[in-house]
Image: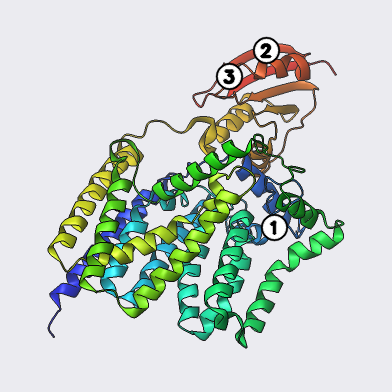
């Protein structure tokens, strides 16, 4: 049997890129030390309610618009590894890693199916090294699965244009699904797709399959609809207010700013979203500009040589129109765009640029450009591996889970019996991250959960604010006030433990 050497080289190259992608994404998973912040604690407390307290929910995480919530499917997604690993939040990091790697292969599979192996390999490589795609695997957060949803959406849109029955059915449910993970972008995506279809592709919208597609979309919206009906249209009322440009219900500081500053902010956010698609930190800050220039050169060269196929032109045109509409909506958004609203939108750029760059690979100029890109990516990979695995700067302090567990273990080990309490100070005030870890780690390892009253022996667990490291002193003087200080100790994570005795 004869072996095709070209296929072997391509397979080895793809495998090498996958290995790089895996190690760029897996340090937190392999070490078990990952970010466990306010949002993580909030999510785990809500998932605990589903898995262990058997309380189902119709809503997911809150948004920056008061009274508006993401859909609940993010929580039910987290419930799977939470159940399998019996509450260990590490399972959710593993889930994010799997989703990130699956996203890369989804991009490869459909690009290969529609546009050939060269385009698939280039796109696969861009996804593998994209810093934001990498970041989506390093901590669990509701916007991160948007990478998978939006990558699938890009090809579902093209499949629908090609009159693929399955893709015509899946297109609108994919948009509805995004409302369970990042509602702001879900709205942008719905509006952009609707405008595009009405203006350019009405035949896709008005066909028999739309009935099933809309029915599936309606089912995905059912939890939020039921919640709204049970709570006097709380969410729909808040959405109406924001569409009217009012700031009622906004819960994120700095939302209500001047018109000009809002537009400048939104433009900067959109610009950063594009830049963050590619390597851009430290000595690689010029790389996105080089990618942009290379793409322009590739477009001009490909048009001159007339090497874009009919399908490629259709794909590039349709996706470009969707991008332009989303960018316009982002600029028109009446309040500052938050960077997480656009999580996964980078996949649009990666797929388009991957296809364009692949078209000139057969020419000398294309080979030179792609070789230069690979050299830069290889240098970046070596630097990142050195930072992540060989010479990591630190354990992440109080921001990561090991720092928090270290503080909890210190308190349990210092206490000589079960009659003690823990009172927690954190900069955001909400203590869900520590509450969950005390419930999961404390009860599992030590068999009990301490009280939180100012009675008897009490440990004050203080996470200083990095921006205002003195702020906890006000908490001590106003909230705590009483009790005799036994000792104060600062752990390696920066967390302060203060032991006090309170008279009963």
- Report the Cα–Cα distance between label 3 and label 2: 22 Å
Dot 3 alpha-carbon crowd within 10 angstroms: few under 14, some 14 to 19, many 20 or more: few
> In this rendering, would 261 be left or right of 106?
right
Tag 3–tag 2 contact (CB < 8 Å): no
Image coords of residue 351 (percent x, y): 38, 63
Dot 2 alpha-carbon crowd within 10 angstroms: few under 14, some 14 to 19, many 20 or more: few
- Report the Cα–Cα distance between label 1 and label 2: 39 Å
Question: Which residue does the image show at 36% across and 74% down from the upper left?
Answer: 313
The reply to whether residue 61 is visible in this rendering is yes
Question: Which residue does the image show at 77% across and 30% down from the upper left?
Answer: 452
Residue 486 — which label? 2
- Nearer mark to the viewer, of 3 and 2: 3
Name the element at disc 2. Answer: strand
> In this rendering, would 379 be left or right of 454?
left
Name the element at disc 1. Answer: helix
Residue 469 — which label? 3
Residue 51 — which label? 1
Q: Dividing the image into 4 quarters, which one contains the C terminus?
A: top right
């Amino acid at each position: 049997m004869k072996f095709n050497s070209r296929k072997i080289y391509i397979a080895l190259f793809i495998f090498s890129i996958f290995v790089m992608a895996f190690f760029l994404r897996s340090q937190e998973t392999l070490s078990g030390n990952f970010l466990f912040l306010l949002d993580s604690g909030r999510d785990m407390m809500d998932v605990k309610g589903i898995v262990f307290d058997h309380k189902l929910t119709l809503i997911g995480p809150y948004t920056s618009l008061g009274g508006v919530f993401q859909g609940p499917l993010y929580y039910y997604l987290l419930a799977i590894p939470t159940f399998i690993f019996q509450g260990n939040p590490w399972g959710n990091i593993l889930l994010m890693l799997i989703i990130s790697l699956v996203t890369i292969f989804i991009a490869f599979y459909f690009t290969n199916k529609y546009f050939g192996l060269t385009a698939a390999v280039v796109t696969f490589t861009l996804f593998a090294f994209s810093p934001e795609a990498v970041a989506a695997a390093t901590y669990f957060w509701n916007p991160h699965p948007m990478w998978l949803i939006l990558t699938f959406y890009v090809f579902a849109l093209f499949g629908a244009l090609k009159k693929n029955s399955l893709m015509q059915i899946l297109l609108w449910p994919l948009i509805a699904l995004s409302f369970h993970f990042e509602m702001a972008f879900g709205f942008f995506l719905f509006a952009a797709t609707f405008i595009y279809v009405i203006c350019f592709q009405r035949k896709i919208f008005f066909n028999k399959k739309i009935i099933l597609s809309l029915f599936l979309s309606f089912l995905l919206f059912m939890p939020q609809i039921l919640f709204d009906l049970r709570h006097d249209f709380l969410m729909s009322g808040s959405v109406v207010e924001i569409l009217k440009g009012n700031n009622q219900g906004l819960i994120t500081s700095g939302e209500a700013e001047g018109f000009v500053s809002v537009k400048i902010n939104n433009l900067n956010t959109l610009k950063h979203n594009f830049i963050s698609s590619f390597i851009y930190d430290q000595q690689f800050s010029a790389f996105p500009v080089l990618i942009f220039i290379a793409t322009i050169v590739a477009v001009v060269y490909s048009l001159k040589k007339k090497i874009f196929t009919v399908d490629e032109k259709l794909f590039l045109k349709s996706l470009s129109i969707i991008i332009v509409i989303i960018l316009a909506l982002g600029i028109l958004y009446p309040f500052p765009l938050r960077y997480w609203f656009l999580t996964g939108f980078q996949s649009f750029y990666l797929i388009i640029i991957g296809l364009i760059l692949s078209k000139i690979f057969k020419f000398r100029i294309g080979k030179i450009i792609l070789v230069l890109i690979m050299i830069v990516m290889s240098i970046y990979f070596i630097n990142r591996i050195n930072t992540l695995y060989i010479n990591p700067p630190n354990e992440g302090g109080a921001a990561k889970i090991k720092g928090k567990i270290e503080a909890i273990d210190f308190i349990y080990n210092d206490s000589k019996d079960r009659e003690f309490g823990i009172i927690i100070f954190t900069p955001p005030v909400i203590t869900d991250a520590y509450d969950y870890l005390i419930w999961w780690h404390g009860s599992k390892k030590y068999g009990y959960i301490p009280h939180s009253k100012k009675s008897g022996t009490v440990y004050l667990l203080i996470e200083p604010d990095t921006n205002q490291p003195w702020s906890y002193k006000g908490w001590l003087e106003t909230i705590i006030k009483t009790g005799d200080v036994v000792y104060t100790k600062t752990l390696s994570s920066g967390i302060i433990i203060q032991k006090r005795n309170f008279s009963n």
